[in-house]
Image (cartoon, coloured by chain):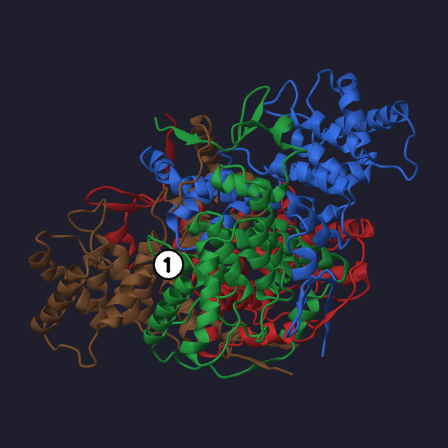
Chain colours: A green, B blue, C red, D brown
């Protein structure tokens, strides 16, 4: 008979524990939700500074207005109002490589380029960053986290998150390398691109020691709160049906055409 | 051309706002994640006391060990490790009427039975509760939030959440009615059942003024953090394949049988 | 140790069986996909006539153009092109009570109103239908399957499905009652409404003896084929980004407002 | 104002068209479901031979017993029986890289290795296959579609699908290359591995000219029918709760441990 070990939730007749602690006495009313999410993911209670950086990241990623994920949640709720879980799940499914994936891609990219021995000063980080940006350019690959289609002159979340991490003593190697990329890339690319907010969030999460495989998961956690906000607003001022009609009423029938290979 | 008004996230070349505030300056580093989730859902910033009650509810619902939702997330990750969003979404889809729905059912039930004029003392609440429990019994319907398959002698989350709400001055009519149901039901049912944790969470969320249609959504937000914890544990100590094999290796082939109506 | 009996797929070193048959020799190349889907759901091989009615229903429900489900699948693919399963799943999640649910609602409604002894002629069916429509009206409830927002003068799928079922000798009590509702409702409601396609599909599926709890599932199966068609078209002539931008560029920021209860 | 062209479903007051045809008159009752799914995906009506190969593939992939996807659908239904769409969507979300992805991976792999000029005889295909298998081995990469954890002496679906495709004159370059890989790989790898069923399905779908980006989608369509079969069986002989309990009752609480990096 297989056994299934876990350090997460457990219960017996009179007790409920979470992460080895009494849920009612030691967690409820004491542990904040961001703190708890960090704890669940690492099985290590974060310090107040770690919690602050983590919650700043979640705030940065919670909602970006009428993104595809927000539209999807509203339309799914319109179509199946009996299933809030379905509306939220549908929205989260848009959290893939393109719209929410930059956070994870950037964290992983930075991590994979950190040498065993970290540089000790800005000059060292700049030299490393220069090498990395040059290699990406030679391979005709983008640097994750570099560039933004709206905030072309700078993403306001980026300097703020650098500052918060520094205040909390959590400005580690991933953020250092990301900042260096921001300084040196114009020399290679011939133009200045902003370090975007999704990217700096990935760097900050990696510096917090969170599992790289789940960085996208934290973006999704933040977005779950945002999607609940979207649903709450949809309940009060619905736009889902207008969105649906604006597409459906502007459809034009065209002749079928055979698929022409790939 | 339709317009789509929103008070949630918005951005322009140099600014990003969330709920009418500067995201970088006024939200990141300042607003906790539970506080932000409340704010997004109500478009009203909660007080510290409201945040504490809200986060206590989220802690109570975050993870209950190897529930169907947790197993589903682990199995989906086993099967499609390239898509963390799919594993989380799959787990959330189990958040329906049976396992996570009690929170919403209880909040709505209590709300729908509140009179325009609330009772002013325990005797008044007890009289109201007695009438409600009698009506449910006469209609052969359960009272949502009453009873638990494990914590038969009392769910430890329940007194704790009552206490936290009272400490914060947020012990309102939904909690009052729920407590009264706990006091009077033995007289009608002939046995004492516990007020369960999911139910008290629904009562507390309703007393916070959160939208009743979305009470299940807050349970799902809590569970998203729990499911990330499940995935993090699965990464370190995988059990998904053992679960799969324990089912697959114990399958027994039986003859097909025609469907016999419904 | 629990055992898990199943009559569906099974395999050993040298064989694979499905529904008790050799998959390679007796199913592949011999059993059509509609036939197989029916067989899997009932564990009884359908007759050619049953298969024809079933496939006519699936054709009727496969795609209705830019429905919310279709838009959701395209937007999710735009946002997470790495996960086709996520785009399809997101689209299916809109298959709830409002847009795809009529099929199931209508089949269940008709079934629940069939007497133990069925009427033997149209006059008998009409009398039964009259009673049912009157009761619904008295209770201020809609009759599922009655009315259509576009096909106000008649849904072309409805007479066609009646005819196909009649040709195959599968015009049973659910279709009989549905037809009678179509004949008698003007007398009660004072206006003539069309019997819609989703409703007649539910009646036909119920007459085929398919499980009522899963009638929505067959609508979802049909829609899966339709959503793949939507994705294939999106690959060749993408519109997802235009849809997203048409919403995002027409957003207007408004002031947050406190939630005003429910 | 953007326009959204589509050749799929369209409707007006009195007509409904699908793929440019009258849905009621020309599709319902005439076009089988497999045929329709092919047509929707390519916007070209398949020949009877193409339909037969396509439906043989769908049969091969519809259900494999208690796979993770089947278990997930049953557990989600247990937890949220009000949402059949959620149970099906959750199951499909397991259709990723590991369990259902081989079909797409194999089709894409074969396609990407086809030269502009195809070999004209088996000797030519063998030479090409030899080169490919050697290159994969040198790069320490697997050949998609080669090997099976159960059917070590041969997957019975494979010769059957080769035979059906040959009967219908649809044994094209992808199947030719796949067969050659089956002949030559022992010379390179030093052992004989089976060509698996998922792989041959990918080769056959690619030879049918279906979009490579959606090969996984066809596996998911097949699996949707299988998952409805799983739900139908679960309704009659439920095992979901036993599966849940077999995990939950065998959990063992362990101490939390700090995450140790990645």
Q: Which residue is mark 1?
A: D219
Q: Are there few (<14), some (14-19), or many (20+) residues within 10 Å of tag 1? A: many
Q: C76 left or right of D11? A: left
For label 1, the SS is: helix
Q: Nearer the viewer, residue C214 or D23?
A: C214
Q: A95 left or right of D57? A: right
Q: Which quadrant of the structure image shows residue B202? A: top right
Q: D183 left or right of B12? A: left
* Residue D36: percent from left, percent from top: 43, 68
* Residue B117: percent from left, percent from top: 93, 37
Viewer can see residue A111: yes
Q: Which residue is pictured at 33% across the width and 37% down the height?
A: B245
Q: C14 left or right of C175? A: left
Q: Is residue C247 above or below residue C133?
A: below
Q: Nearer the viewer, residue C142 or A242?
A: A242
Q: Which quadrant of the structure image shows residue B208? A: top right
Label count reads 1
Viewer can see residue B260: no
Q: Which residue is pictured at 49% across the width and 55% down the height?
A: A216
Q: Is residue C163 above or below residue B220?
A: below
Chain letter of disc 1 in the image: D
* Residue D25: percent from left, percent from top: 52, 74
The N terminus of chain C, quarter of image:
top left
* Residue B121: percent from left, percent from top: 90, 26
């Amino acid at each position: 008979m297989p056994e299934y070990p876990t350090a997460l939730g457990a219960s017996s007749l009179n007790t409920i524990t979470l992460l080895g602690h009494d849920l009612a006495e030691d967690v409820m009313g004491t542990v904040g939700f961001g703190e708890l999410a960090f704890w669940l993911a690492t099985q290590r209670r974060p310090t107040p500074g770690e919690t602050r950086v983590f919650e700043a990241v979640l705030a940065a990623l919670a909602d970006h207005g009428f993104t595809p994920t927000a539209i999807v949640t509203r339309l799914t709720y319109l179509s199946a109002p009996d299933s809030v879980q379905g509306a939220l799940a549908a929205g989260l499914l848009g959290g893939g490589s393109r719209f929410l994936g930059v956070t994870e891609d950037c964290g992983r990219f930075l991590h994979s380029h950190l040498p065993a021995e970290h540089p000790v000063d800005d000059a060292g980080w700049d030299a490393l960053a220069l090498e990395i940006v040059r290699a990406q350019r030679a391979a005709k690959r983008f640097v994750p986290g570099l560039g933004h289609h709206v905030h072309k002159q700078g993403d306001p979340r980026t300097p703020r998150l650098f500052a918060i991490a520094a205040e909390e003593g959590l400005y580690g190697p991933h953020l250092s390398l990301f900042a260096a990329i921001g300084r040196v890339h114009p020399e290679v690319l011939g133009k200045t691109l902003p370090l975007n907010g999704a990217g700096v969030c990935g760097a900050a999460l990696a510096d917090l020691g969170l599992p790289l495989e789940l960085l996208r998961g934290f973006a999704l956690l933040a977005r779950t709160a945002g999607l609940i906000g979207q649903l709450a607003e949809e309940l009060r001022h619905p736009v889902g049906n207008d969105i649906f009609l604006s597409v459906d009423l502007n459809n034009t029938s065209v002749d079928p055409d055979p698929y022409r290979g790939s």
